[in-house]
Amino acid sequence: MDDSPYQGYLYAYPHKTAYRRLEPRPLLSDVWSGERQDSLFGYIHLPFCEMRCGFCNLFTRANPPDEQVRAYLGQLRREAREVRDSLRPDARFSRLAIGGGTPTYLTAPELEELFGIAADAFGATGVPMSVETSPATATPDRLEVLAGHGTTRVSIGVQSFLDAEAHAAGRPQRLAEVLAALQAIRDARIPVLNLDLIYGIDGQTPQTWQHSLDEALRWHPEEIYLYPLYVRPLTGLGRRAHARADWDRQRQELYRQAVGVLEDAGYVRHSMRQFRRADAPEPDGPDYCCQDDGTVGLGAGSRSYTGGLHYSFDYAVAVPEVRAVIDDYISRPSGDFRHAEFGFHLDAVEQRRRWLLKSLLRADGVDAVAYKERFGTAHDDDFPQLTELADRGWLSGDRTTLTAEGLSRSDAIGPWLVSGDVREAMGTYVPR
């Protein structure tokens, strides 16, 4: 294992760069026919933002023409109908999320239309629903729409409470805008506020990091996510020279500082990134378990997950390529949405590996009994390499939970456990 604790964020397994064109394209009705559909996760992707941050490698376009936004929403509605018809009539959704991009890039009337599409597709009311926003777009009129449709969680990327640091990360925001957005979210009385911060920015010091942590805590957010800065290909920062010998050490020191600050303030660490206030209200409804429950995605940059197939549309990061994929999505006949187009088939071994990874990188770790009930084998027999993590002091003696140091090294442990086949597919992907 490489000594650097910052190899990559394994937020999904396998990564989308391992997906390939599916030939022939399977019908979604066939893909979902053998799957449980009583506790699904619904996701809608809105690939538009008011700006493209320097660290961002998400599938998004900044400041699209109004006619493209309108065309996208119209196509999204058509996709929603086809996808819903591919599921069983009694399919039930337990959680919803709207991400991007920045969903609140839409105007308030456009957000009303988006929630109508969500209702048609997922038929879910009164279930936990998360929506992403930004300082520039978290306006009272938009938040009123979110609250009116039962949004239970809003996530806002602040990154830093110092304008100079935000600009150094390629995010040209103003503090006054950030503070106004946070006040508007609190005024909207949405139950859960999540606030994202980034550490490892050029020029950031323990003192400036402490300032951002203190400012974040003033708002008593129910959740705080801490993200190490990564410089990725085809991003704004990726086009700049960025070689710093002490970067790993700086990020580790800032992270440990933040863990101490947040724990002292009454937050519980649920993963390397997620911290939740101990006295925050519990989420309504059943918890979504990505190891067991399927995901139905809508939109040009969405992903969908069944037990044996993960699928999506094409993937890109560079601005011209993103625009091409969005144009392609908008121009498709509605019948195309009855099929899966790009994806990755997970055999029995990959299904075990995904279950392990998505459990192990959480603070509560692997449920050994649930794993054995599902797969008929023991997780530590299936993955003997876990012994090395235990030998390093990063895994508990019963091989089920990462230690505090192990959790801090999730961005090295996750990539290390990626299979050879997935690693090869990711390695042959040409970034575009």
Image (tube, rainbow, N blue to C red):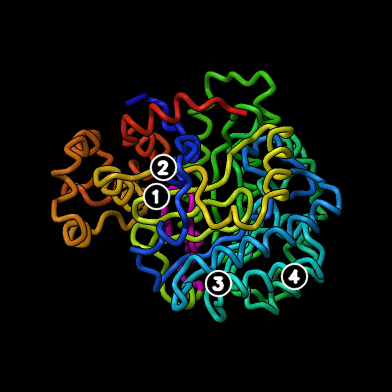
Which amino acid, mark 4?
Glu
Choose the circle earlier in sequence order: 4 or 3: 4
Choose the circle earlier in sequence order: 4 or 2: 4
- Secondary structure at badge 2 equals strand
Choose the circle earlier in sequence order: 4 or 1: 4
- Secondary structure at badge 1 equals strand
Q: Position of residue 51 (x, y in %)?
A: 78, 44
Q: Quadrant of the C terminus?
A: top right
Residue at x 21% of width, y 33% of height: 388
Residue 200, image quadrant: top right
Residue 353, image quadrant: top left
Q: CA distance from mark 4 to mark 1?
A: 30 Å
Q: CA distance from mark 3 to mark 1?
A: 20 Å
Q: Position of residue 239 (x, y in %)?
A: 69, 23
Choose the circle earlier in sequence order: 3 or 1: 3
**Mark 2 — residue?**
344
Q: Is residue 393 left or right of residue 93?
A: left
Residue 376, image quadrant: bottom left
Q: CA distance from mark 4 to mark 2?
A: 32 Å
Which amino acid, mark 2?
Phe
Mark 2 in CB contact with mark 1 (< 8 angstroms) = yes
Instruction: Give the vertical position of 422 relative to 84 (above or below).
Output: above
Which amino acid, mark 1?
Leu
